[in-house]
Amino acid sequence: MSALKHLNKYFYKYKLHFLTGVIITVIAQIFTLFTPKLVGDSIRILERLDHIEKETVIKLLLENITWILITTLIAGFLTFLMRQTLIVMSRHVEFDLKNEIFQKYEVLTQSFYKQNRTGDLMNRISEDVSMVRQYVGPAVMYSINTLIRFTVVVVQMYIISPQLTLYSLIPLPLLGYFVFKLSKQINQRSTVFQQNLSILSTFTQEIFSGIRVLKAYSIEEKKREDFEILTENSKQKSLALAKSNSLIGPLMIFLIGLSNLVVILVGSLLYFNGKIPDIGIIAQFILYINMLTWPVALLGWVSTMIQQAEASQKRINEFLKVEPEIYNLIPHSTPINGKITFKNVSLIYPDTGIQALSDVSFTLDKGKTLAILGKTGSGKSSILSLISRFYDVNQGEILIDSTPIKDCNLYDLRRSVAVVPQDAFLFSDSITNNIRFGKENATQEEVIEVAKKAVVHDNIIQFDKGYDTILGERGLTLSGGQKQRVSIARALIKDAPILILDDALSAVDTETEEKILYNLEEHSKHITTIIVTHRISSAKNADQIIVLDQGKIIQQGTHEELLTAIGYYSELYQKQLNEKEIV
Ligand SMILES: Nc1ncnc2c1ncn2[C@@H]1O[C@H](COP(=O)(O)OP(=O)(O)OP(=O)(O)O)[C@@H](O)[C@H]1O
């Protein structure tokens, strides 16, 4: 139960719901007690048929029936209110917990996301929270209900006949035990079934995402066979679960029947021996026992529900406990101008231990442009990650406007950097909203202006719905180059003092690239720009160019300076000149 302690704060938060629920449950239980009493009274009236007039008997019976109706209606209404308070409370807790987890997910760093699979993250915020809700809602409600009903009913039974009470209760622990055992089995089987389902959905999700590769390699047949094996496995698990589930009903019927038999048998003996005054009591006890069997059976079920919730909350707590390695250290705002200085910076990725950068130094004044070139894996993107402080350096120092990066307010810093990533990610939303992501309150004119600068406007207006065209899974699929340019427009609209293009022009032709670079130069006169590229054409106009190799700067200077030096840059220039890539 220790993991579930995390939820106590929510019980405290919703204490009014909780206490009201408990009070309503007590009153509801008291009202359910009237029915057995009134049924017993009715039988006692019938027993007196020889002594009183038939009309009087009928009148008394009708009176009893009316009371049964009234008390049952009140008990029913109170049970409805009980659900309204306790189950509604559990829904509130469910959403609060989801929000708490989501907020945590938002502050966790890239390393966390690299170490944990998306499916797992989704599961904890959905499946696990649902399991926990079962504890906060139904489990708590049924436990309170059972406790109160048991106390109220057993006290009432004991007052009427202590002996009959004792015998009638004998089968109940047996019922509780069997249901507990069975629910445990159901629980285990359902966990296995869920795990299998998870494997199945991960498999299908990957198939759908990679459907083009699958078809291109013509491996549909093989994948169909794999899928069949997985579904067959799932079916077996599901059948085993259904078998256990189907045992619950008959078991309940058998044990309730057994309890009734005990009451009738022992009750009759006590009646014959004059230990109970009338047979109305036997009828009353049968009803009492039936009132107790469900709650006792539910106890077994509730205990497995709590075990499941405990396991789920444990998994949730694992993530809630994770402390992000990168967090904001500065509470006040720190405006950013755009000067960037790297002083002997080294970076080792914590999860892989790969040394991505070593001893990197450069200074980029506000409004200047830096181009970074280098072979794949040489550390170009790592420099960019450091500027947005997605990682902290292992050695050296990064200054933003002469302030150590850790002394900058993290949110101000990230708001001041507009990034066009290597893999442009667009949301399943309209093109306008995708661009507006960079500036929520941007007008349509601003959206069009940046789209023109990113040289994608002409493409957009050719779509039937223009800027309202929906992108993504259920919408239009843009080409790689179009995606990159929408992503550039999104970064431009942000109007941040630092603009980063991470190989963001790789999918556009050289002519369009030239136009975009020209527009960028106009747009970013006062903006510090960093362009990571494999093309000399993208780098040549930069104020400063650095060439990386295995995390180290091997060349540094302007286009002209580097052309005259022997090395990577001039070799690449020659190669690309030959390929006529440079205009
Ligand atoms: N998030 C990360 N976690 C762990 N290792 C990483 C991470 N990102 C990059 N690396 C590793 O760091 C090294 C440098 O990678 P980086 O992405 O900076 O290179 P790059 O020059 O941008 O490459 P490319 O031109 O292919 O984009 C590589 O060996 C890579 O495997």
Image (cartoon, rainbow, N blue to C red):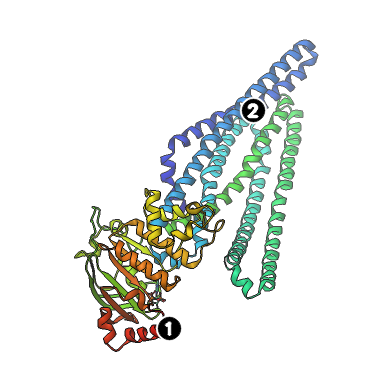
Q: Label 2: how many residues lie within 10 Å, few (<14), some (14-19) or many (20+)?
A: some
Q: Position of residue 214 (x, y in %)?
A: 62, 71
SS category of the residue bearing label 2: helix
- According to the picture, the residue beneath numbered tag 1 turns out to be 579
Q: Is residue 471 left or right of residue 490?
A: right
- According to the picture, the residue beneath numbered tag 2 turns out to be 160
Which is closer to the viewer, label 1 or label 2? Answer: 1
**Could you say which quadrant of the image residue 515 lies in?**
bottom left
Q: Amino acid at mark 1?
A: Glu
Residue visible at 36% across and 84% down? 572
Q: Nearer the viewer, residue 356 or 361?
A: 361
Q: Nearer the viewer, residue 424 or 226?
A: 424
Q: Amino acid at mark 2?
A: Ile
Q: Is residue 385 left or right of residue 135?
A: left
Task: Look at the picture and state if 394 lies above or below 431.
Answer: below
Q: Is residue 1 visible?
A: no
Ligand 1 quadrant assignment: bottom left
Give the spatial CA distance, label 1 vs label 2: 102 Å
Of pointers 1 and 2, the one earlier in the residue sequence: 2
Task: Look at the picture and state if 300 lies above or below 163.
Answer: below
Q: Nearer the viewer, residue 271 or 556?
A: 556
Q: Is residue 390 left or right of residue 362?
A: right
